[in-house]
Amino acid sequence: MKIDFANLAYQHNLYKDEIESAILKVARNCNFIMGDEINMLENKLQDYLKVKHAISCANGTDALLLALMALDIKHGDEVITTPFTFIATAEMIALLGGKPVFVDIDERTYNIDASKIEAAITSKTKAIVPVSLYGQPADMDMISEIAKKNSLKVIVDGAQSFGATFNGIKDLALGDIATTSFFPAKPLGCYGDGGAIFTNNDILAEKIRSLRVHGQSKRYHHKYIGIGGRLDTIQAAVLIAKLEHYEKDLKLRQQVAANYTKALKDKKNIVLPYIENRATSAWAQYSIRIEDRNIVQEKLKEKNIPTAIHYPMPLHLQECFKYLGYKEGDFKVAEKVSNEILSLPMNPYLCYEEIEYISNAL
């Protein structure tokens, strides 16, 4: 048996008539930048998430950058986040001259440990950026309470969690601003790079829309220093077509995760994903923890089972963040998890026979 990790080709074939028709329409209209589909997509995203403003952009990294710029994060400002995530989360803080301040993670959810955030707050702290890792929101109740108490802003990095909920609310509708990625392998992915920013704040929304097009207030009149961060119209068309089927695909992801858990629950020496009662996950990944990971990974490869490591080195130990002064041992949980984490094939179309094959191989 040969397993496909993300199975993008299968999904394309399912919806190819709608997707290819949408792409062809954009090509024939030749309105490739800020075409009608951009506004259509943003309206549909607003409706789906029940959020006031959805602002599409070029990718998930730009979404984070625009969110931080909208909050005026600048040189010397401190932003609290997790060391166990993709680098973009902290990279964009540093790019603006801010200082990423890391807080260790919860050993069950792998999200930032909210109980440790308050101890990291200083007079220079301006914001908190929790990451909804692998598709599950962080403890937004505690994070919101801490932010309110300390007059801080919250940016939810939901690059992996489109459609996930916390207390019945989509996590991308939480925080002062939320961001997501539409990278092809994400739960809702386009056919290239793409992202979006969400907020219920009219002032922030207006500013983000301006920052996205070089800080323009009107054509060739620039209110802010901004970026060229627009989403391509073709990508918007793809997303509109796929969004129609997203709830079905999301339920399939959740069923695949349930099947994995059922197949693996009695296996020894494997730590399975944990989802809090208050949360639902978009299941961007199904990540287990296992000792002797490299040996296991190699054995699975021999059986045509692809795996991935999200993520092998926490951010505080990355060379680019050496200047922050962190050292090995500073965030013990993140370091432990990074040495054991292993992502198994995850997509809505994994059948039970494939999951059983993977389980038996493990």
Image: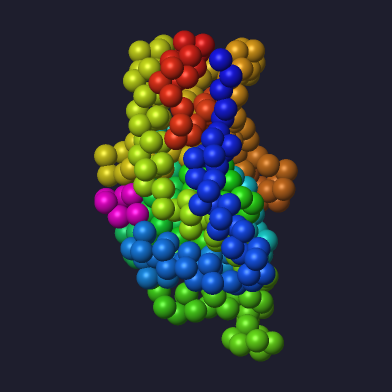
Q: Please tell me which residue is depicted at 41% across the width and 57% down the height of the picture.
A: 172
Which of the 4 image quarters holds residue 237?
Answer: bottom right
* 90 within the magenta span: no
- In the rendered image of this protein, does residue 357 appear above or below residue 14? above
Which of the 4 image quarters holds residue 340?
Answer: top right
Q: Nearer the viewer, residue 4 or 70?
A: 4
Q: Nearer the viewer, residue 350 or 215?
A: 350
Q: Nearer the viewer, residue 354 or 272?
A: 354
- Residue 272 visible, this angle: yes
Q: How many marks?
A: 0
**Left of 28 or right of it: where is 6?**
left
> x%, y% of residue 157?
49, 54
- In the rendered image of this protein, does residue 337 appear above or below residue 264? below
Q: Please tell me which residue is depicted at 69% across the width and 87% down the height of the picture.
A: 220
> x%, y% of residue 357?
48, 14
**Left of 115 or right of it: where is 208?**
right
> x%, y% of residue 109?
40, 37
Residue found at the very far right of the displayed protein: 319
* 167 within the magenta span: yes
- Residue 78 visible, this angle: no
Part of the protein shown in magenta: 165-170
Q: Please tell me which residue is depicted at 66% across the width and 63% down the height of the picture.
A: 27
